[in-house]
Image (tube, rainbow, N blue to C red):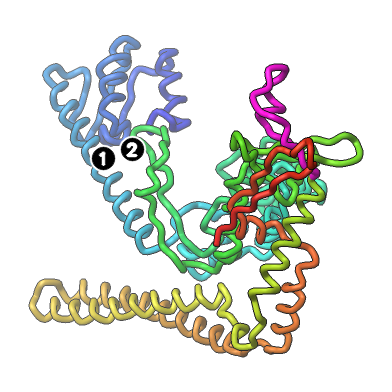
């Protein structure tokens, strides 16, 4: 806004102190295009402060009577121009968003702008490795707070500090001198789908061109385009992390969730079982029992955590090793995420080149028909050819990289890796979350000592 300009504010302050008598401008729009400021200063405060306003090109002079309506009309025209300009800029940005072009000032942590194309992002090797580590820790059961602790312990700067250290101007001020991570930043990374190669823009927008207020946009109105850039995290890993985050996980103070965290429920009241310890062993008990004090709303349903984990792990190993037979035909080399992204980009570039070719034909026909002049044709034709050349160069690079990635991996290595995985010496949490819906714990029979444990599978 005009009122936010430093020199404008300095001028208004000097005018209020009556340090001068005249404000002289080339045109009224040079003073402001905001009708509200026209009324506030030119017609309101300036006469009180004894300031004369003159706009030479508009013949506007507050000393000339009968001139006020002309100034107000100029003010309206200037504001309409500003509104139309803002709308046109927004339409251009929306078009780029629909095409999957990145229009932000700074990419999300883990990416950097492509030096060859400012609307395309590529992985930042150092930061991308940190992002992969964050997702891996989440798969292993670490909570957001614990992941932040691990990052700080290793001396890894947070995204804001990382940008500042590289001299990248950042919109967010550095809140401390240490560049420490927190669970909010970690959570934002773990839930951002852009790391899978999907361009998502338009999550927030300004209320109007005259306001700095920014509001959240409904998810249905986001601009979502797949395959616009190289993925840092594959789709399967991302979805596994999202499933884990949806579970209500409780930790023992270390920040690391146990293998079955959030999955174990009381068979009678349905509440989540909470973890407790007697100093030697850890147990799970009904949360409603633990939180209800003297007036118990449910019984204990206590079960040893280590024994329950062993039981569930053994059951998973049994099902995997019994019902899955390792077949070499199942281990054909899989297309990596980078390869998928490159093929998608190749498809998009091919479509854009076709559009440019059609546009060149239309441009020539317009020149022949006299719709555009020779000079306009030459200028537009040069612009189209430059863009076409840039697209062809990028397409050639993609074809070259795809050719290198066509080399198949050795099937023997894949078989050996698969055999090790099928042993399941340590059952990973992501597998537990992917296979089990919930585990119900019944109350122990005081006479027989038996306790029912029911595993509800997702298949």
N-term-proximal mark, 2 vs 1? 1
Residue 343 x, y percent position in the rendering? 47, 78
- Front-most of 178 and 225? 225
Residue ID at (54%, 53%): 192
What number is the disc on residue 209? 2
Residue 186 x, y percent position in the rendering? 65, 47
Q: How many marks?
A: 2
Q: Mark yes or no: residue 169 visible.
A: no
**Distance Cα–Cα, label 2 vs label 1:** 7 Å
CB under 8 Å between discs 2 and 1: yes
Q: Mark yes or no: residue 83 visible.
A: yes
Residue 320 within the magenta-colored segment of the rendering: no
Label 2 packing within 10 angstroms: few (<14), some (14-19), many (20+): some
Q: Residue furthest right?
A: 280
Q: Which residue lies furthest to the front in this view?
A: 447
Residue 320 x, y percent position in the rendering? 67, 70
The vertical placement of 384 against 148, above or below, is: below
Q: Give the range drawn in magenta.
A: 285-304
Residue ID at (21%, 71%): 376
Q: Does residue 167 appear to the left or right of 379 in the view shown?
A: right
Label 1 packing within 10 angstroms: few (<14), some (14-19), many (20+): some
- Front-most of 417 and 438? 438
Residue 40 x, y percent position in the rendering? 30, 19
């Amino acid at each position: 806004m005009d009122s936010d300009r430093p020199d404008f504010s300095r001028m208004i302050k000097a005018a209020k102190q009556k340090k001068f008598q005249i404000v002289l401008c080339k045109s009224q729009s040079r003073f402001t295009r905001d009708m509200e400021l026209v009324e506030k200063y030119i017609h309101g405060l300036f006469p009180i402060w004894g300031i004369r306003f003159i706009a030479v090109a508009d013949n506007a002079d507050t000393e000339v009577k009968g001139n006020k309506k002309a100034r107000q009309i100029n003010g309206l025209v200037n504001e309409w121009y500003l509104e139309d300009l803002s709308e046109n800029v927004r339409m251009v940005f929306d078009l780029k968003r629909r095409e999957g072009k990145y229009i932000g000032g700074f990419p999300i942590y883990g990416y950097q702008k492509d030096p060859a194309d400012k609307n395309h992002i590529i992985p930042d090797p150092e930061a991308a490795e940190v992002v992969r580590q964050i997702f891996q820790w989440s798969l292993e059961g670490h909570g957001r707070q614990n992941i932040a602790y691990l990052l700080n312990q290793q001396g890894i700067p947070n995204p804001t500090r990382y940008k500042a250290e590289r001299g990248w101007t950042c919109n967010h001020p550095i809140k401390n001198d240490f560049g420490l991570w927190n669970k909010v930043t970690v959570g934002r990374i773990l839930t951002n789908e852009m790391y899978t190669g999907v361009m998502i823009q338009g999550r927030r927008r300004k209320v109007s061109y005259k306001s700095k207020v920014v509001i959240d946009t409904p998810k249905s109105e986001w601009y979502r385009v797949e395959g616009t850039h190289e993925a840092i995290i594959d789709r399967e890993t991302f979805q596994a992390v999202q499933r884990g985050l949806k579970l209500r996980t409780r930790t023992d103070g270390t920040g690391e969730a146990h293998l079955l965290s959030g999955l174990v429920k009381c068979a009678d009241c349905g509440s989540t079982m909470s973890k407790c310890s007697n100093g030697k062993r850890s147990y799970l008990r009904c949360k409603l029992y633990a939180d209800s004090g003297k007036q118990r709303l449910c019984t204990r349903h206590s079960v040893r955590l280590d024994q329950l984990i062993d039981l569930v792990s053994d059951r998973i190993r049994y099902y995997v090793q019994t019902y899955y037979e390792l077949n070499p035909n199942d281990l054909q080399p899989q297309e990596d995420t980078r390869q998928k992204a490159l093929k998608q980009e190749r498809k998009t570039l091919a479509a854009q080149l076709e559009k440019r070719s059609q546009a060149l034909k239309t441009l020539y026909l317009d020149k022949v028909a006299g719709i555009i002049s020779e000079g306009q044709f030459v200028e537009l034709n040069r612009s189209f050819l430059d863009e076409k050349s840039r697209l062809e160069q990028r397409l050639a690079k993609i074809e070259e990289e795809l050719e290198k990635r066509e080399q198949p991996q050795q099937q023997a290595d894949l078989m050996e890796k698969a055999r090790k995985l099928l042993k399941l010496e340590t059952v990973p949490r992501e597998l537990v979350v992917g296979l089990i819906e919930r585990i119900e714990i019944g109350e122990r029979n005081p006479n027989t000592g038996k306790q029912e444990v029911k595993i509800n599978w997702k298949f």
